[in-house]
Image (spheres, coloured by chain):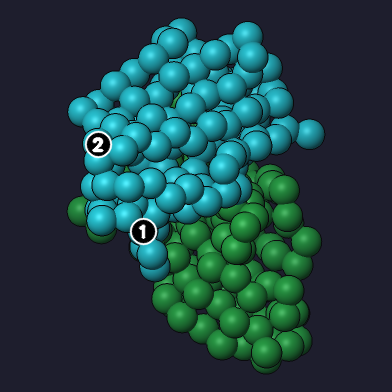
Amino acid sequence: NAGVTQTPKFQVLKTGQSMTLQCAQDMNHEYMSWYRQDPGMGLRLIHYSVGAGITDQGEVPNGYNVSRSTTEDFPLRLLSAAPSQTSVYFCASSPRDISGNTIYFGEGSWLTVV
Amino acid sequence: GENVEQHPSTLSVQEGDSAVIKCTYSDSASNYFPWYKQELGKRPQLIIDIRSNVGEKKDQRIAVTLNKTAKHFSLHITETQPEDSAVYFCAASRASGTYKYIFGTGTRLKVLA
């Protein structure tokens, strides 16, 4: 059972470039989300989805887009990378009742924008 | 908006001593409170959780207590070991409405041998 799979694990971008962080889960979870982790800032929610075709913004959505065309996949797009987006990104999933169930995290994607 | 404050940001204890990490949440409708442990370069992993209808939960050397009136909950680790060294995050979420966890800013625990 692969769980939550993120790619790539490491990426260096130049300012202004665009890219997509991929996330897939094989647990048939309806809830998926993206967090970024910065030193001293904890895990901040970027976007989340409660099912295919449904997405919503989290705490820090600016500069990022998401889509949820299938239950399994939840890609995160950086439209025009900025140095402030240098961070570690975690994708996570959970069964439908997010309020009482464990969040499962992917292994993380280390992104550096120069 | 919703907020979870976590203290302390760093904590050093001698091996065998106890460690306590405290979190305070702002959303009174929150009713699920998990704790995650994150080792260096790894993903956060759930270590224990508690729901609002329970005041305390224990799992071997780890326990969590919840005070709904004061809106705070705490993680207690007894007989600490070097492998307990990690960053610990608390989180809070509610049963309806929002489908998101709000995380604390983390506590870096160092267990000194």
Is residue B42 at least partly visible in the picture? yes
Residue A38 place in picture, x, y as percent: 61, 63
Picture colour for chain A: green
Rendered view: B54 above or below A59: above
Q: Residue at x 21, y 28 (%)?
A: B60
Colour chosen for chain B? cyan
Q: Position of residue B31 (x, y in %)?
A: 54, 18
Q: Quadrant of the C terminus of chain A?
A: bottom right
Q: Amino acid at mark 1?
A: Glu
Residue type, numbered disc 2: Glu
The tag on residue B79 is: 2
Disc 2 element:
loop
Q: Residue at x 41, y 43 (%)?
A: B36
Q: How crowded is the residue under tag 1: few (<14 C-alpha within 10 Å), some, or many (20+)?
A: some
Which of the pair A53/B72 is nearer the observer? B72
Instruction: Identify residue for label 1.
Output: B39
